[in-house]
Image (spheres, grey):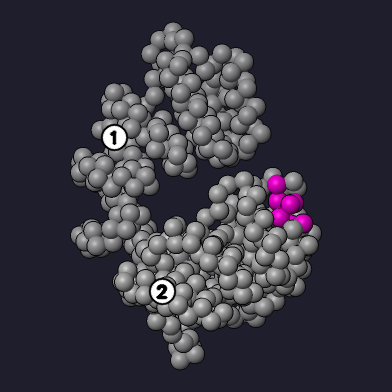
């Protein structure tokens, strides 16, 4: 029969976008997605077709199409089963706004359909609650799972980590009878999310002692921790991890290579960063982004812009992150005209809607070039209200060029957004002190002290290298 034929082809071409859409069209035009059961088996055949389609659309952006198919399935009175809900929970988890609106109704539907006793459905829902930040609901769902397997235990572990409950995460981790590589990586991820980079690296070291082989996700996360470790030792730790990869002949994936480029770039080891880039046979857009950013942030702005041109020649389409790196390079090179052209091309040529980070880069670009009037006008005409990053870039430009009146006005707006940010008080005090407005500088220092806001002590990297 045609339904069996199309179901087989749907499962065969589950990751091929054009074929999925063609099969979907055939299923619709032949009326095979309408629930007109002749018997019980034909009723569940329609469910199988819907499940296969919902699963297939998880491979095609935007993922909410899977959820729309689910709603159509209910409209046609096709009964969903446990597999249906597992796929739908995964689909809505890609959009937190959609998940926050639909999670509770879907939970109710799963309960109504009698599939919530299925441990796989329970684990999927647990994971969804964890991503939504609803830790209490995640806990309740875990408690309802009879004899939870390691997948369910990892799901609640991830929920703890995502929500900053690292104490609970460690207690749960240590109580687990079995810890696999996913368990270890989740704990490392949890510490990384909480910006506890030293703790994350310590867990990685313990993982190696216990002879657990790290996977791609583990290496990417721990290298990111080394790159972002502000205290001394990050460079040494990252080099050790790179050495481990080489000694154990671990296959260098695109994302691992990208993490190494980013790590060495952030630590100022640009030649090593470039060597890793050149050795990579396969490069994704994230790889180019990391290399462009590394060059831009290490005083090699012209080379960063040349790398951007090479990227386009190689047929790699830039994304939002690419333009942050490119605009940063333009700002540091004071290439105002070129940077403005790139900013305009984002929407016009690539369909990329600028984010606050892009607006901040443009303000930084104009500010560094001394074009404070243009920078102020740019902020004023933004389509969305500027956030602290955009205003911070403008304040930085005011400090560089001694624009005290504008600086104080921008600073006032920033303090409304971030009243306990010590850096703002220090910057504003410095701007006023530079112009010998000692009374205003003293007032700011006093306000900072009265509010109990303390400056973070600086450190030197030289002694740790």
Q: Secondary structure at mark 1?
A: loop
Q: Tell me how far mark 2 sits from mark 1, CA to CA.
A: 63 Å
Across and down, in percent, residue 247 comes to 50, 78
Image point (31%, 45%), residue name:
134
Dots 2, 1 in contact, CB < 8 A: no
Across and down, in percent, residue 443 comes to 41, 74
The quarter of the picture where residue 289 lies is bottom right
Please tell me which residue lies in front, 176 or 77.
77
Q: Is residue 143 left or right of residue 247?
A: left
What label sits on residue 118 in the rendered view? 1
Image point (39%, 32%), residue name:
102
- Would you name the residue on which mark 2 appears? 443
* Residue 80 versus residue 318 in the image, above or below: above
Q: Which residues are magenta?
A: 341-347
* Residue 175 versus residue 71 in the image, above or below: below
Image point (43%, 34%), residue name:
88
Whether residue 155 is visible here, answered yes or no, is yes
Q: Is residue 32 left or right of residue 180?
A: right
Please tell me which residue lies in front, 110 or 56.
110
162 is within the stretch colored magenta:
no
**Mark 2 or 1, nearer chain start:** 1
């Amino acid at each position: 029969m045609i339904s069996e034929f199309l179901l087989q082809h749907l499962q065969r071409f589950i990751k091929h976008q054009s074929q999925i859409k063609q099969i979907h069209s055939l299923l619709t035009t032949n009326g095979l997605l309408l629930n007109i059961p002749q018997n019980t088996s034909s009723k569940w055949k329609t469910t199988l077709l819907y499940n296969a389609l919902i699963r297939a659309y998880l491979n095609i952006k935007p993922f909410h199409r899977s959820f729309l198919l689910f709603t159509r399935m209910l409209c046609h009175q096709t009964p969903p089963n446990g597999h249906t809900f597992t796929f739908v929970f995964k689909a809505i988890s890609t959009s937190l706004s959609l998940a926050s609106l639909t999670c509770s109704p879907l939970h109710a539907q799963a309960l109504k359909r009698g599939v919530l006793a299925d441990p796989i459905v329970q684990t999927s829902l647990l994971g969804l609650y964890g991503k939504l930040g609803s830790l209490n609901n995640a806990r309740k769902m875990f408690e309802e799972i009879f004899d939870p397997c390691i997948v369910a235990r990892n799901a609640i572990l991830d929920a703890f980590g995502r929500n900053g409950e690292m104490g609970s995460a460690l207690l749960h981790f240590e109580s687990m009878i079995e810890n696999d590589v996913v368990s270890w990586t989740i704990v490392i991820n949890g510490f990384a999310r909480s910006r506890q980079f030293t703790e994350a690296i310590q867990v990685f070291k313990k993982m190696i002692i216990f002879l657990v082989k790290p996977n791609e996700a583990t290496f990417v996360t721990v290298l990111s921790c080394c790159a972002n470790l502000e205290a001394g030792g990050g460079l040494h730790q990252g080099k050790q991890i790179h050495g481990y990869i080489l000694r154990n002949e671990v296959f260098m994936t695109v994302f691992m290579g990208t993490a190494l480029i980013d790590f060495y770039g952030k630590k100022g080891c640009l030649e090593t960063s470039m060597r890793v880039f050149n050795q990579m046979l396969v490069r994704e857009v994230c790889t180019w982004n990391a290399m462009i950013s590394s060059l831009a942030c290490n005083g090699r702005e012209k080379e960063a812009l040349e790398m951007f041109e090479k990227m386009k020649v190689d047929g790699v389409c830039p994304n939002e992150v690419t333009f942050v790196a490119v605009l940063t390079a333009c700002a540091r090179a004071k290439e105002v005209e070129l940077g403005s052209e790139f900013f305009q091309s984002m929407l016009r040529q690539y369909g990329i809607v600028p984010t606050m980070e892009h607006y901040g880069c443009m303000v930084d670009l104009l500010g560094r070039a001394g074009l404070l009037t243009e920078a102020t006008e740019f902020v004023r005409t933004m389509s969305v209200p500027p956030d602290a990053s955009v205003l911070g870039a403008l304040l930085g430009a005011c400090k560089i060029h001694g624009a005290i009146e504008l600086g104080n006005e921008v600073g006032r707006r920033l303090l409304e957004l971030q009243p306990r940010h010590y850096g703002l008080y220090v910057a504003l005090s410095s701007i006023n002190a530079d112009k010998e407005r000692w009374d205003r500088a003293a007032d700011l220092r006093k306000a900072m002290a009265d509010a109990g806001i303390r400056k973070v002590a600086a450190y030197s990297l030289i002694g740790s290298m």
